[in-house]
């Protein structure tokens, strides 16, 4: 009898539900998120014998628990939250939203679905993912700070700084001011505070880039051999891909990163539309790689793009086609790295 244990993880508690092959419920438990969480769950599951653990979003809130179970020798599957939500919605008997029903839907999804990703011990790909996420967060914080500083400078002098913001330009702008009123003095002080934040973020981003460059060099990846793929994009692609073996082919990889079109057909009308699904961070990386190739003459990407234009495709259609070719090339290089 196959026993699947579905886990709905949260910050403070984890709810687990065990089911057998006919989806009959064998037991349920809720444990607090403590240092003994994995031990408590394994002790509770011991009477069921050999079982498979299914954790919702094992790369998110369930990451630590999933890693603890894998290190203890358990077989753990990663169940996407959207898949578990569909199972719960379609179950007329347990459609209410609560932790036990969520955990049961995770278990049912693992029982009925094939090809779910098996969780493994975190390796260098997890390091890349963490570095890429930190670099992305720093970039967003910098953009937000620059917008606030632009607004603050525009309140001090009409037009403010009209070009792209750099810390040196903002410092020269503030040094040239001669505040006359108490309000202007406060505005200048606040602007200097934002400038200090910007300088701190710039220093952090430079450090992040150095660390990513060292990590990519140590990984000896062949992704950087592709035109337009530098250390930053290589780190993001490796980190967000994870284990490339979990993809059955380049088509599934393209669906994961959003470069494969989605079908919207009905009756005799066959239509494919742009996909907004998939990992948008990876899609953005592939987009920037494709743009880099288009902007530089005599690259394979530029030649391919111009050929698609000569075939009558619009610039957007040609760019989408090129992004798919870039996705295929990335998948090929990731396979080479995995074999190496």
Image (cartoon, grey):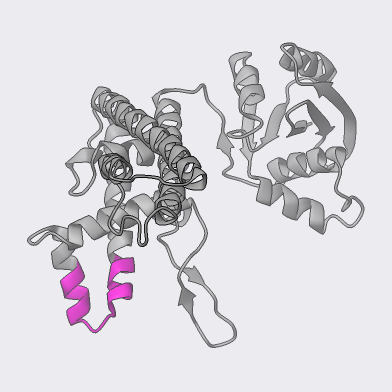
> For residue 316, what is the image quadrant?
bottom left
> In this view of the protein, which residue sits in the foreground, 313 or 5?
313
Residue 247 position within the rendered picture, expressed as x and y whole percent measured from the top left:
45, 45
Figure check: 70 above or below 241: above
Residue 254 position within the rendered picture, expressed as x and y whole percent measured from the top left:
41, 55
Q: Is residue 139 left or right of residue 83?
A: left
Chief SS of the magenta region? helix
The number of callouts visible is 0
Q: Is residue 269 visible?
A: yes
Residue 279 position within the rendered picture, expressed as x and y whole percent measured from the top left:
48, 50
> In this view of the protein, which residue sits in the foreground, 111 or 104?
104
Residue range in magenta is 305-321
Figure check: 306 above or below 74: below
Residue 230 position within the rendered picture, expressed as x and y whole percent measured from the top left:
23, 40
**Residue shown at the point (72%, 47%) measured from the top left:** 84
**Residue shown at the point (56%, 33%) measured from the top left:** 118
Q: Is residue 300 magenta?
A: no
């Amino acid at each position: 009898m196959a026993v699947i244990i579905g886990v709905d993880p949260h910050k403070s508690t984890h709810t687990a539900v065990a089911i057998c092959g006919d989806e009959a419920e064998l037991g349920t438990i809720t444990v607090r998120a403590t240092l003994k969480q994995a031990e408590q769950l394994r002790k509770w599951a011991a009477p069921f014998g050999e079982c498979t653990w299914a954790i919702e979003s094992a790369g998110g809130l369930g990451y630590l628990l999933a890693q603890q179970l894998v290190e203890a020798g358990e077989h753990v599957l990663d169940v996407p939250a959207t898949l578990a939500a569909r199972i719960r919605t379609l179950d007329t008997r347990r459609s209410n939203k609560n932790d036990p029903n969520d955990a049961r839907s995770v278990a049912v999804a693992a029982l009925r679905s094939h090809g779910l990703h098996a969780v493994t011990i975190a390796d260098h790909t997890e390091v890349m993912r963490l570095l890429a996420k930190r670099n992305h967060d720093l970039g967003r914080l910098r953009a937000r700070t620059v917008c606030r500083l632009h607004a603050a400078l525009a309140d001090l002098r009409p037009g403010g700084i009209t070009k792209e913001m750099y810390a040196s330009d903002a410092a020269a702008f503030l040094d040239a001011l001669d505040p006359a009123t108490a309000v202007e003095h406060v505005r200048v002080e606040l602007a200097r505070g934002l400038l200090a934040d910007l300088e701190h973020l710039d220093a952090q981003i430079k450090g992040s880039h150095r660390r990513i460059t060292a990590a990519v060099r140590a990984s000896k990846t062949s992704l950087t051999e592709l035109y337009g793929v530098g250390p930053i994009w290589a780190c993001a692609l490796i980190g967000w891909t994870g284990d490339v073996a979990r993809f059955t082919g380049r088509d599934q990889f393209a669906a994961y990163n959003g470069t494969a079109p989605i079908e919207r057909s009905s009756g005799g009308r066959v239509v494919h539309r742009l996909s907004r699904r998939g990992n948008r961070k990876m899609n953005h990386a592939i987009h920037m790689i494709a743009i880099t190739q288009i902007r530089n003459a005599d690259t394979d990407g530029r030649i391919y793009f111009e050929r698609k234009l000569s075939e009558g495709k619009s610039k957007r259609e040609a760019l989408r086609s090129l992004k798919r070719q870039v996705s295929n090339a990335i998948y090929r290089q990731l396979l080479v790295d995995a074999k190496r």
